Amino acid sequence: MNNTINILTCTVLFLLTIDSYSCSNKSNDNKLIIQNKTQIEKNKQITYAVHVNAKTPYKLYLDDILIDRFYENNMNRSTDLNTYLLNNGTHKLKIRYLPLSDSQDGLLDPKDIIFNKDSRWHIYFVSLNKDPEAPLGYTNEIDYRSSALNIITPPKKVPFWEQEWDLEIKDLPYKLKGWSESEDLSKVNQDELKKEVVAFFEEQRLLLNEGMVDEYLQLGLKKDQELIVATYGEDLEYYNSQERKKNILRAKGDMLPLENYTLELFANGRLATLKIASGQYKNWSALLSKSEKGRVSGWGILVHKPKGSSQFEIIRK
């Protein structure tokens, strides 16, 4: 392998899709991402987020993509949405409340979602102007009263409870292609699809296990390009860093075999992944490493088939 540095130069233009960016890729070796970006004004760098204040475990979905999950009781947690927002428009948020981890009957009690009309758990939908130097991490004021989403409780105990809301996204200064034109994988033979996804995951597993960091990063290049745009270059230095490569090298020689997995589809069939089907690590990515000290790490990816392509591509993690 030669020592040529592969420089991917991406010019990020305001309100253009990622496919419109000027990018050149000149080698298959050590990858760097260098971004020459037309600066989006700070006050237009909007980050949408959902804050969940819940007593029970839950799963959170945006446009049929699992974006957060928490399996313990009593949680206050914020989740940025930009990573999964491709453009402005109406987007669907869904929460699935699950029974308390110590539930005696395995059912979700309505009072675990809302105590009464005056005392309840909340979900807030907010937009932020992030600023790491600001005391709260953002500069704008948030009206939590008007940002609260209306929660309806189940009429009786149930195994789980789902609720959906339409979120109006109006102020994103970017548009991404992502999986918007990708193949609907729910319409193909599921046995054949599973074989293809497993083969792709096995390729990822081998790259990680052999410490082939540059090759591993190359397969996630499109993902990185889009995430840089969606987060306004927030973690740009990390994408280029030796720290990132060192972190990936933790998996070298420690990757576990692909086994006990199930195929899951998201984004109405346009995204696919493999997850552990049962046991201690149920719902973790099927790509797992375990160090000599027993530390287990997940290396989850979401893949899609771009329009006109027969090959999978990593588009999110």
Image (spheres, rainbow, N blue to C red):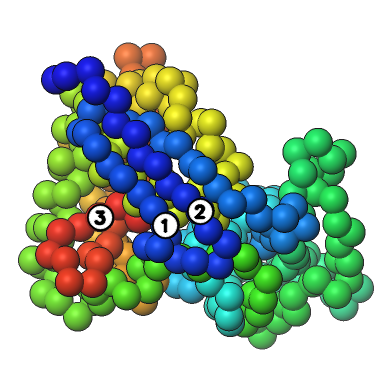
Q: Are marks 1 and 2 in contact (CB under 8 Å)?
A: yes
* Residue at the (32%, 75%) spot, across then down: 181
Amino acid bearing label 1: Tyr
Q: Residue tagged by mark 1?
A: 21
* Residue at the (79%, 72%) spot, across then down: 148
Q: Residue 36: x percent and y percent?
A: 51, 43
Per the model, the C-alpha gap separating discs 1 and 2 is 6 Å
Q: Residues within 10 Å of mark 1 (few under 14, many from 20)?
A: some
Q: Residues within 10 Å of mark 3 (few under 14, many from 20)?
A: many
* Residue at the (86%, 66%) spot, across then down: 144
Q: Residue tagged by mark 3?
A: 313
Q: Residue 295: x percent and y percent?
A: 41, 23
Amino acid bearing label 3: Glu
Q: Residue furthest top?
A: 292
Q: Residues within 10 Å of mark 2 (few under 14, many from 20)?
A: many
Per the model, the C-alpha gap separating discs 1 and 3 is 19 Å
Instruction: Identify the image quadrant of residue 158.
Output: bottom right
Q: Relative to residue 102, is residue 241 depicted above or below?
A: above
* Label of residue 84 in the image: none
Left or right: residue 151 compared with residue 292: right
Observer-side mark, 3 or 2, equals: 2
Q: Can residue 54 be seen in this snapshot? A: no
Front residue of 128/172: it is: 172
Q: Residue tagged by mark 2?
A: 12
Q: Residue 133: x percent and y percent?
A: 81, 36
Q: Does dot 1 land on a helix, a strand or a loop?
A: loop
